[in-house]
Image: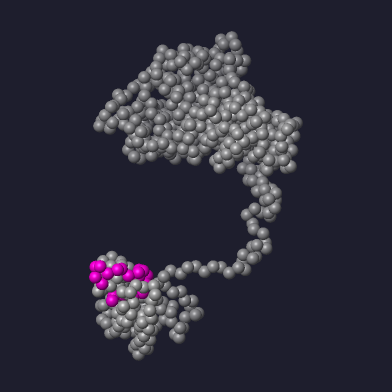
């Protein structure tokens, strides 16, 4: 580890002083782990993990954490931030009694809580924690999403010293009453800027609210910029500020290359590059989950063993993919930015940015997966005509340019962008307004290439006019209601609903109003669309119309119905009263059910059957919607 920082100068910024020391091979100014004040047990764990000398972030933050101070630390990815907060906190952390009763007694702990944004980071922290716990005797539990709740609940019931969690799953367990944080003495927020980018700020604030006010808080981030983590720095009290290197810097051991390519040739080019440069120990980064899956399928068809990691993959799938990549069973990992931060995978030969990231900072974290711990690596970024400005923003953030990749023997397509090899990086990345203008220009360019109009959201004029001239389809009307326009309603043409007809039938038979169904009575009191009330029309008109309707219904009932059974045809003639009786009389309803006599028929004679049929008679083929009633 000491060779990693040979011949470099690192500036350690704290809340009280600024210390600059030289880490030359003489090593006079480089402290050892023993000089930092760690216990013998922790020093033994350091030796077990193979650490020889602390990294700058470890040398700067460990003394403050051992003294119980709050710490705000920023360092570039791959500089040992995990050990920087685990070594000092586990050095001073007490132990809780571990229960074997599984909930019969109150669970103890956790005394230390580590919150991290992704499942992979949580598992990586757990591995380092277990390596240290072999010497210190602490117990740890990790709770992440994508796996079953029950094993995590059982572990929490037994108690633990250290809890490592992602915000979403931890909040779920707290809401279920399976986890209590009132004993937390040390709180660690790892990759705080990433958690805020992922929208975890409300959940993190709720979780922190469950902990003690006198806790020690350590906040680690890739940057301490006010815009990135300013909304969460109020969780620390009088912190020691440790800033090793800005997030804009990249490791000197990573060589960067850019490859201009046509959009239509981009997919086939990836397999060609991997086959030419070697497909072993490579990570390919894509912008979206669907694109990562598509790239993985194409590489598999090209004969390259690969696995995909993104937010839609289950925890078991993620673990299998990482395990296969670490063991060498899988040559290529295709991932989104969920794998860009904090994941320590050794011996990554190079990184391919299949898509230019939207945020220039994500590029720094992506290429940081290679060239770790003094190893050499390189990165390659595919740049299309739509990505040139975004890649220039990345170079402006880094303050240096990438070299043009040697594309001999590779098919780049016909729309290759021009990238000046002698370009000079801009002073600063583009602002929000400029990025918005670029997005609109990119959308217009894509629409022009696809043969559409300049506005991608606008349809062609001809098709738009044709769409306006086409008749609109009518909506399906709900049953039991009739829509009549006000200008079409008149006295000569009346459209009545079924409930109104039932009310008129009841009035035609001189029945008391008490026997009228509630639905019919409610509608007969006042009819919509300007129609007259039933009582205002002459009785003779109502009686004549009812007679005509009843005679027509009786005529239809006399006709043979081939779709009905013999038992149904044997009762062809019915009285005018029975033709509608089951629809109007509430006294005839039996059991649960719909309108009128349907419920009564089900109760007395079976489904569609008659009350006169015996138990051995075959059932009628009448459907629930067929008209008719009691035999």
Q: Is residue 112 above or below residue 517?
A: above
**Residue 613 point in image, percent of width and height:** 26, 72
Closest to the observer, 566 or 350: 566
Q: Is residue 585 above or below residue 616?
A: below
Q: Is residue 484 left or right of residue 136?
A: right
Q: Is residue 384 left or right of residue 124?
A: right
Q: Hey, which residue is sitting farthest bottom in the picture?
A: 540
Closest to the observer, 443 or 279: 279
Closest to the observer, 219 or 523: 523
**Residue 17 point in image, percent of width and height:** 53, 20
Residue 380 visible to an observer of this rendering: no
Q: Which image quadrant for residue 457?
A: bottom right
Q: Is residue 434 above or below residue 45?
A: below
Residue at x-position 60% and y-position 25%: 349
Q: Is residue 50 above or below residue 454?
A: above
Count of marks overlaid on the render: 0
Q: Which image quadrant for residue 629?
A: bottom left
**Residue 382 point in image, percent of width and height:** 66, 36
**Residue 410 point in image, percent of width and height:** 71, 34
Residue at x-position 67% and y-position 29%: 276
Closest to the observer, 170 or 430: 170
Residue at x-position 60% and y-position 24%: 371
Residue at x-position 50% and y-position 24%: 81
The chosen color scheme is one colour
Q: Which image quadrant for residue 571?
A: bottom left
> In the rendered image, which quarter contains the N terminus?
top right
- 275 in the magenta segment: no
Magenta stretch, residue numbers: 613-631
Residue 151 visible to an observer of this rendering: yes
Q: Is residue 308 left or right of residue 103?
A: right
**Majority secondary structure in the magenta region:** loop
> In the rendered image, which quarter contains the C terminus?
bottom left
């Amino acid at each position: 580890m000491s060779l990693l920082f040979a011949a470099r100068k690192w500036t350690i910024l704290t809340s009280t002083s600024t210390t600059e020391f030289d880490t030359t091979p003489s090593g006079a100014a480089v402290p050892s782990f023993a000089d930092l004040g760690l216990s013998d047990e922790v020093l033994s764990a350091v030796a077990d993990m193979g650490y020889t000398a602390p990294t700058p972030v470890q040398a700067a933050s460990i003394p403050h954490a051992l003294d119980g101070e709050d710490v705000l630390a920023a360092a570039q990815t791959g500089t040992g931030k995990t050990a920087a907060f685990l070594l000092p906190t586990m050095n001073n952390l007490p132990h809780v009694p571990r229960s074997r009763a599984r909930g019969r007694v109150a669970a103890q702990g956790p005394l230390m809580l580590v919150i991290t944004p992704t499942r992979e980071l949580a598992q990586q922290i757990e591995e380092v924690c277990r390596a240290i716990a072999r010497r210190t005797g602490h117990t740890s539990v990790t709770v992440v999403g994508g796996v079953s709740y029950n094993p995590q609940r059982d572990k929490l019931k037994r108690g633990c010293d250290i809890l490592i969690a992602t915000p979403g799953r931890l909040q779920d367990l707290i809401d279920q009453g399976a986890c209590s944080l009132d004993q937390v003495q040390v709180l660690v927020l790892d990759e705080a800027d990433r958690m805020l980018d992922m929208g975890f700020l409300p959940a993190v604030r709720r979780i922190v609210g469950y902990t003690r006010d006198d806790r020690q808080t350590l906040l680690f981030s890739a940057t301490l910029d006010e815009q990135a983590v300013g909304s969460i720095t109020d969780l620390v009290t009088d912190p020691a500020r440790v800033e090793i290197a800005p997030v804009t810097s990249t490791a000197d051991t990573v060589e960067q290359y850019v490859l201009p390519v046509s959009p239509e040739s981009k997919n086939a080019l990836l397999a060609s590059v991997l086959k030419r440069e070697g497909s072993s120990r490579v990570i390919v980064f894509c912008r979206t989950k669907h694109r990562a899956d598509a790239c993985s399928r194409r590489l598999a068809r090209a004969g390259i063993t690969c696995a995909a990691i993104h937010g839609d993959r289950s925890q078991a799938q993620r673990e299998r993919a990482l395990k296969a990549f670490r063991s060498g069973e899988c040559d290529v990992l295709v991932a989104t930015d969920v794998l860009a931060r904090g994941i320590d995978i050794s011996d990554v030969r190079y990184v391919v940015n299949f898509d230019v990231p939207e945020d220039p900072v994500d590029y720094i974290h992506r290429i940081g997966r290679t060239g770790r711990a003094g190893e050499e690596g390189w990165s390659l970024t595919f740049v299309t005509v739509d990505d040139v400005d975004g890649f220039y923003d990345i170079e402006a953030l880094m303050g240096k340019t990438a070299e043009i990749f040697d594309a001999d023997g590779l098919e780049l397509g016909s729309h290759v962008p021009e990238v000046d090899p002698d370009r000079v990086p801009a002073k600063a990345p583009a602002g929000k307004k400029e990025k918005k203008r670029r997005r609109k220009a990119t959308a217009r360019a894509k629409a022009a290439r696809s043969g559409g109009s300049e506005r991608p959201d606008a349809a062609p004029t001809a098709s738009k006019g044709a769409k306006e001239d086409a008749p609109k389809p009518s909506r399906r009307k709900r049953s039991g209601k009739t829509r009549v326009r006000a200008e079409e309603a008149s006295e000569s043409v009346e459209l009545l609903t079924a409930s109104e007809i039932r009310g008129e039938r009841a009035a035609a038979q001189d029945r008391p109003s008490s026997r009228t169904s509630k639905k019919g009575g409610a509608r007969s009191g006042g009819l919509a669309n300007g129609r007259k009330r039933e009582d205002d029309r002459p009785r003779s008109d109502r009686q004549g119309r009812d007679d005509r309707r009843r005679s027509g219904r009786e005529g239809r009932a006399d006709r043979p119905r081939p779709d009905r059974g013999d038992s149904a045809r044997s009762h062809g003639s019915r009285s005018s009263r029975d033709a509608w009786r089951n629809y109007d009389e509430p006294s005839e309803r039996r059991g649960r059910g719909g309108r009128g006599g349907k419920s009564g028929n089900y109760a007395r004679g079976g489904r569609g059957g008659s009350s006169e049929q015996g138990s051995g008679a075959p059932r009628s083929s009448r459907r629930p919607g067929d008209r008719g009633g009691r035999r």
